[in-house]
């Protein structure tokens, strides 16, 4: 008789695949001028991905607890929609740019999640977009992706 499969292996493999994809994507980044302080556009994603790989390894080596069908809740359709929204975020950034994509993502995710009035979500999403713009563009002087629409409009 075969024992139950360890779900940690599949989860760890999925996390590792995402981390490897993120590391591979950093090889397509534009070069950063030498001499800039701190972690650059290549180093930071690689550091985060390396941490994810380490955590995936730890998870993969962890024994699974015994579980039955009653222990695991059904994944709601909203959760799948949020997951799809997360997958759609990067293409949205590629089209309209990072700064407008963040508030749109936060607003739509909040509406899908439910429980918060849309006006509160809209103000929060707008505030987050402005905050990210102030911190990263104005203070740190980083160039965030403008998307092909932003480039076309001259932003």
Image: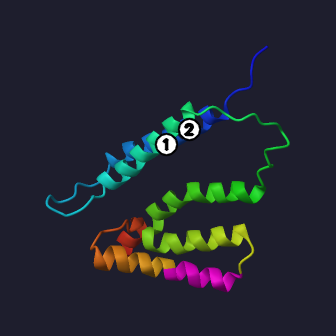
Q: CA distance from mark 1 to mark 2?
A: 6 Å
Above or below 35: residue 125: below
Work out which quarter of the rendered image holds the C terminus and state it. bottom left
In this picture the colour scheme is rainbow
Work out which quarter of the rendered image holds the N terminus and state it. top right
In the image: residue 143, left or right of residue 65: left
What secondary structure is the stretch in magenta mostly built from? Answer: helix
Residue at x-position 75% and y-position 16%: 2
Q: Nearer the viewer, residue 136 or 99?
A: 136
Please report the bounds of the magenta region as a residue range. 117-127
Furthest-top residue in this view:
1
Above or below 118: residue 67: above
Disc 1 on helix, strand or loop? helix
Q: Position of residue 55 (x, y in %)?
A: 49, 42
Which residue does the numbered mark 2 point to in the structure image? 59
Dot label at residue 55: 1
In the image: residue 23, left or right of residue 3: left
Pointer 2 local density, CA inside 10 Å: few below 14, some 14–19, many at least 20: some
In which quarter of the view is residue 120 placed? bottom right
Q: Is residue 119 magenta?
A: yes
Disc 2 on helix, strand or loop? helix
Q: Look at the numbered discs 1 and 2 and tell me whether their residues touch, using CB distance below 8 Å.
A: yes
Residue at x-position 50% and y-position 44%: 18
Above or below 60: residue 126: below
In which quarter of the view is residue 11 placed? top right
In the image: residue 68, left or right of residue 109: right
Residue at x-position 49% and y-position 35%: 57
Q: Is residue 122 visible?
A: yes
Q: Position of residue 100 (x, y in %)?
A: 48, 74
Residue at x-position 38% and y-position 68%: 146
Furthest-right residue in this view:
70
């Amino acid at each position: 008789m075969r024992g139950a499969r360890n779900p940690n292996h599949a989860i760890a493999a999925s996390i590792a695949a995402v981390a490897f994809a993120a590391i591979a994507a950093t090889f397509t980044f534009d070069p950063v001028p030498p001499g800039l302080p701190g972690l650059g556009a290549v180093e930071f994603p690689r550091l985060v991905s390396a941490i994810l790989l380490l955590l995936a390894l730890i998870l993969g080596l962890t024994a699974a607890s015994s579980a039955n069908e009653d222990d695991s809740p059904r994944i709601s359709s909203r959760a799948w929609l949020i997951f799809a929204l997360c997958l759609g975020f990067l293409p949205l950034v590629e089209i309209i740019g990072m700064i407008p994509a963040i508030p749109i993502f936060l607003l739509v995710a909040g509406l899908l999640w439910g429980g918060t009035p849309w006006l509160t979500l809209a103000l929060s999403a707008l505030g987050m977009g402005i905050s990210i713009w102030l911190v990263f563009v104005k203070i740190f002087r980083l160039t965030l992706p403008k998307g092909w629409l932003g480039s076309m409009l001259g932003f």
